[in-house]
Image (spheres, helix red, strand yellow):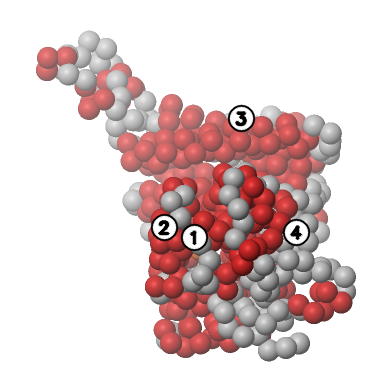
Amino acid sequence: MNRIIDTGENHQSWKNLPPLVGIASMKDAITKGFSVEETVRRLKRYHYALRRLYEIFNDHITAEPVYELKMAFSLHSHLCAEHVTALRKRVSEMREPPLGLDKIPDEDLRLVFDEILASSSTEERVTAIYGIVLPDLVAGMKRHLDETNPLTDHPSTRVLRFALLELGDMAAWGSTAIRCLCEDKAVDDDWLALIENLLARAGSIDGTQDVSDEIATAELVPMRSATPYKYDGVVKRDERFSDPYNMGVNAEIFLYNEDFDDAAKVIMMFYKRLREIDVPEMMASIIAETPDKPWDYYRDMTRQLWDEARHAMMGEIGLTSLGLDWTKIPVNHTWSMGLNTQLTPIERHAVLYFIEQGLMPKTGKRYEWEVGVASNNPLAAIVQDFDWADEVLHAHIGRDWYVSAIGDARKAVEYGDECWSNVLMGWKQWKDDGLTEHRNWWPEIYAEACEKAGIEPDPEILAYHETYESKRADLQTIPAE
Ligand SMILES: [Fe+2]
Ligand SMILES: [Fe+2]
Ligand SMILES: [Fe+2]
């Protein structure tokens, strides 16, 4: 009575219907598995790894210059946060109050992530994350699926299977990225060996692997994290973003000009979408510098951050679809730079909320979508449709986390307006300092788009020349410097 005498190989189901609703063979369900305690122990270790990865991705969005990497870090921080959320829920289902999800499960693992957070270059970070940590995490989760009882622990297997789907995508992107980035730039082998040895001493992320005596007694000294890590909120862009202080073309005044045709407005809307790259740059700083919120705060904010990154890429596809080279357009970073360096995290959130709730009236996102539809450009219609839907979600996220922190809806809006007005935009100063000429880039882009489309430019649209010198993006007047 205390051993398995039939492993179910000869089990017969009714008319040979798949047994156990198809989730497992009879044999696996009879012979495999480990305890709830061991399951929770492993899940907490994956949770810790994903939470640290989410943090590392987020904290390197703003100061990462390369556009493609900024976008990838935005997506990957969102994906990690989603799986953190799923794992937290699963752990909470397993007799676990108190959850202990904030406890560090392993000091060696902590050091792995501290080292990567403080790593000294993008190449290092990318190699350690996608070349070492992620494959280790994937191997651990696969081991879990292979060893657990597929029937008794079915809820965990769902969480892990979904996680593996996206972690696999991340790892695939990452292994290509390592090849692209590290071809002509070597990463410090000693440092990579430290990461590998720390992981080995932790028994891998899941903590199931044997630790050799040599590794167990090795002296593993912190390298990058020997100096405490400090978040860098100063925005960096790669060389394709020439003229990042250029505020020479006011996109909003253009869009609300009733005399201009919708097709020309589509170009300006695609530019506005691409310019949303400044929102992840700014939101990452709020997330990085706002500690001790409930987990759902970080999850929601990270989702929004990813949407904003997506909107930037919608701009990229839009401009590309018109045959335009987006790198010829000065996509300024003045907003994210100003907010990150001049305002506190809650003030930045206030400005974000003020702008986003201002997008909701008829003249905002609906209007942009109507322009997209009226332009007969199917891509513009789709882009603006989803941009609008996402921005409605963001207004909700703002209400849930920012307005609730202020406590009063009207005050929350006023405070956002006030904080925005307090951001010093050095229109003249930047010009005087030689940072930009505020060159009017519109005519050449518009002319090129017309040429590609085989139409004559409208002289009035071609002559458009309104800047941000005295009008903000919400068309409010800016006092002279
Ligand atoms: Fe946005
Ligand atoms: Fe948007
Ligand atoms: Fe938004």
Q: Say which label, 4 or 3, has the lower sequence index.
A: 3
Query: Which residue is the site of mark 3?
Result: 210
Q: Quadrant of the C terminus?
A: bottom right
Q: Does label 3 or label 2 sit earlier along the sequence?
A: 3
Q: Amino acid at mark 4?
A: Lys
Residue 31 lies, in percent from the top left, at 34, 22
* Residue type (three-letter) at the residue carrying disc 3: Asp
Q: Residue 377: percent from the left, percent from the top?
A: 46, 49
Circle 4 residue: 236
Residue type for callout 2: Ala
Tell me which residue sits at (51%, 62%) in the image.
Answer: 261
**Residue in the foreground of this view, choosing between 272 and 181:** 272
**Which of the numbered marks, if any, corresponds to residue 262?**
1
Reply above or below: 428 against 392.
Answer: below
Please say if 474 is above or below 85: below
Horizontal side, residue 284 vs residue 431: left or right? left
In the picture, measured across the screen, residue 186 lies left or right of residue 67, that is right
Residue 308, percent from left and from top: 54, 58
Nearer to us: label 1 or label 4: 1
Residue 113 position, x and y percent, is 67, 49
Q: Nearer the viewer, mark 4 or mark 3?
A: 4
Q: Label 4 vs label 3: CA separation?
A: 43 Å
Residue 257 visible to an observer of this rendering: yes
CA separation, marks 2 and 4? 37 Å
Which of the two marks, 3 or 1, is nearer to us in this view? 1
Amino acid tagged 1: Asp
